[in-house]
Amino acid sequence: MTTKLSGNAAIYTIGCRLNQADSSLVCDRLTRDGWNIIEMEPGSELNLIIINSCSVTGTASQKSRQAARKFRRLYPSACIVVTGCSAEVENEFWAGENSVDIVLTNPQKKELVEHVRTFFEDQRQVSGMLKFSSNEPPDVFMENAESSFPFKSRAFLKIQEGCNNFCSYCIVPYTRGRERSRAWDEVIADFKHQLDSGFQEIVLAGVNVCAYNDHGRRLPDLLNKLTGFEGKFRIRLSSTEPHPDNMELLSVMAGNPKICRFLHLSLQHGTDEILSAMNRKYTTAEYADFVRAARSLIPGIHMGTDIIVGFPGETDELFRKECEFVRQMAFANVHIFTFSPRKGTPAATLPGQVNPEVARQRYKQLMEITEASSVEFIRSQLHQKLQVIFESRDKQGRFTGWSDNYVSVRCGAAGINPHGITDVIAARAVPGGIEAEMPCPAM
């Protein structure tokens, strides 16, 4: 019988919700092998540190490197593992980085326990780079692990991997490989495990969850299956891409209160000219039609998006057109990124590179527009009943959490069930969100 290792381990996750879901699976694998998962706090005694890295932008890559060096200073005797997307596309750097002991690509996350054993048992060997996402077959896959979420109020459920879009600016198809979906039965079993663990919000995660497909069973089918479980819970979709199945998805969401009124649908630019240069496969008119349909079918839906400013070829006139389109869309939330050339992507060498100072000014201008629309969305929710999961409590005794349509809500009333779904009434707008009250008994 193989002896289990023991000690304190911590997982530091950088980047997207899919990385959060991957970290939860790593947590399960380590726990089954005897590791005690703890929070990374000052004074913690740690034997093992996992850095689940990101490389979607240059800033994310830098953050991953800084984390490794910081943890080596703080925990000189710990085994430090770096995995995730940065380990895929920047593996040559990590192979020569003295701050880490083990480097694992995304596919090797499933083998993490074995590599850690090798480190501790066989003269502290460093693993080699053996498997890359770009070589993974586009087949249905299994994780052979259950999501584990100590210290969290919501669970992240991985259902999909990879991307076939190959947008001209994006490194993700090279870090995650081709589109592939997690096996239907394993997804359902893991979902049931999360419900049994007491989570009332489960986030479905993937590079593009709308691309889920296990032998013809797609995301709308999966949602119908998962919402059929009994109990009080809600499902939130992580970031989505424009996809042919999205209209059907809206129909499923509209008819099911267990699905959060929330879509984060990447736009990336508000002009057809730049969308074409980005190799995005839709027009602004098609995007706008979908947003209008979503708002018509699902009142109060939170429509969020991602936008890149300063993309090569973005003239003053194109930026003006983008600002006008973004105003029209009135997004509830926007993640704005200044274009960051990623080595190995076509956009890194496109003509018409935008001056960095011009890009910074455009970022500020677009931020003013999106902040105004965010405030308007919050105001539109006043006096409405909201379903909120309260996650934390401040020194004044007020709870803070998120509504199903992703509004930050605080409430100081008695009768709140932390980490469970609580009905409240949106009373007042406050900076960044809403001050709520408990509903009257008759409501």
Image (cartoon, rainbow, N blue to C red):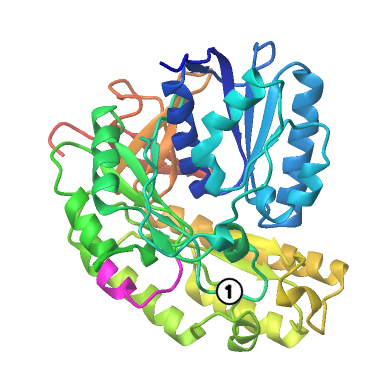
Q: Tell me where residue 131 appears, x and y as whole percent.
A: 59, 51
Residue 212 falls inside the magenta stretch: no
Q: What is the span of residues highlighted in magenta in the rendered image?
A: 241-250
Position of residue 78 in the picture relative to residue 211 (left or right) = right
The local crowd at label 1, few if under 14, some if 14 to 19, many if 20 or more residues have their Cα within 10 Å, is some
Q: Secondary structure at mark 1?
A: loop
Quadrant location, the N terminus: top left
Report x, y in % for residue 391: 43, 29
Position of the C terminus, as image quadrant, is top left
Q: How many marks?
A: 1
| Nearest to the observer: residue 246 or residue 336 | 246
Specify whether residue 383 is in view. Answer: no
* Residue 167 as seen in the image, left or right of residue 33: right
Q: Position of residue 176 (x, y in %)?
A: 55, 58
Q: Is residue 245 a member of the stretch shown in magenta?
A: yes
- Dividing the picture into quadrants, the one containing residue 99 is top right
Instruction: Give amino acid for label 1.
Output: Phe
Q: Nearer the viewer, residue 31 or 95?
A: 95
Q: Is residue 152 above or below residue 34?
A: below
Nearer to us in this view, 23 or 127: 127
Q: Position of residue 330 (x, y in %)?
A: 49, 68
Q: Is residue 19 above or below residue 377?
A: above
Residue located beneath label 1 in the image: 166
Q: Which of the 4 quarters of the picture holds residue 208?
A: bottom left
- Looking at the image, can residue 420 be seen? yes
Q: Residue at x 21, y 49 (%)?
A: 226
Q: Which residue does the image show at 69% across and 23% down from the upper left?
A: 79
Q: Is residue 265 above or below residue 33?
A: below
